Amino acid sequence: MRKAAVLTLFFIFFIASSVHALNWAYPFVVWDGKIYEVMLEEKVEEWDIGKFIGKVKVEADDMTGEYYGDASNFFKKGTKYFEIKGIPTSTAIAVEHDGHWVKAVYMEKAPFHPMNILTNKLFIALIVIGMIGAGVYYMKKRK
């Protein structure tokens, strides 16, 4: 009887914990390892838009909360980021939204994720160079 009760409780908790989705506190974008809170009501005028600096490449996972690289929990892949003239990017950036731009304010450094390293162009270049070097070394050694 006791085993049945424990087993029943286990299944209740297992089933209850397997269905969930995150409710994000605020819309954000990640650029250059920094999280920016997007102020959807704070528009940036066209004449204040500086140069293009990046875009959303990854959408945050609503089930696990995981994200890496240039990501967002609100905007779709391809959404563009711009500098705001007269404001350093360490303070704020502009994000393209519904035909205009909105301000995104720096909040904090983005958490580490292994994919940040694995998708880094420098890391990939070093791996390729290392593989070529190892191939050349073994080819010379064979002779």
Image: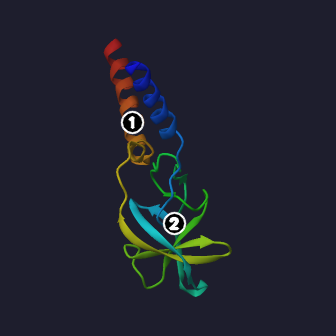
Viewer-proximal residue among 43 and 48: 43
Tally of marks:
2
Q: Does 81 sit left or right of 98 as displayed?
A: left
Tag 2: amino acid: Pro
Amino acid identity at mark 1: Ile
Q: Quadrant of residue 48?
A: bottom right
| Residue 143 visible within the image | no
Residue sitting at 56 percent across and 62 percent down? 74
Colour style of the rendered protein structure: rainbow
Quick one: SS at disc 2? Answer: loop
Which residue matches tag 1?
127
Mark positioned earlier in the residue sequence (1 or 2):
2
- Is residue 11 depicted above or below 86 in this figure? above
100 vs 72, left or right, is: right
Q: Nearer the viewer, residue 19 or 83?
A: 19
- Quadrant assignment for the C terminus: top left
Labels 1 and 2 touching (C-beta < 8 A): no
Q: Which mark is residue 27?
A: 2
Q: Position of residue 19 (x, y in %)?
A: 54, 42
- Residue at left offset 37%, top offset 58%: 110
CA separation, marks 1 and 2?
35 Å
Residue 95 visible: yes
Q: Kindly identify the residue that appears in the image at 58 percent across and 86 percent down.
A: 45
Where in the figure is residue 25, as x and y percent of width and height? 46, 64
Q: Dividing the picture into quarters, in which one does residue 56 lie?
A: bottom right
Residue 65 pos. (x, y %): 46, 50
Residue at point 36%, 33% (across, down):
130
Q: Quadrant of the N terminus?
A: top left
State the image coordinates of residue 76 (x, y, percent, origin top left). Answer: 61, 58
Furthest residue to the right? Answer: 99
Which residue is situated farthest in the front direction here? 1
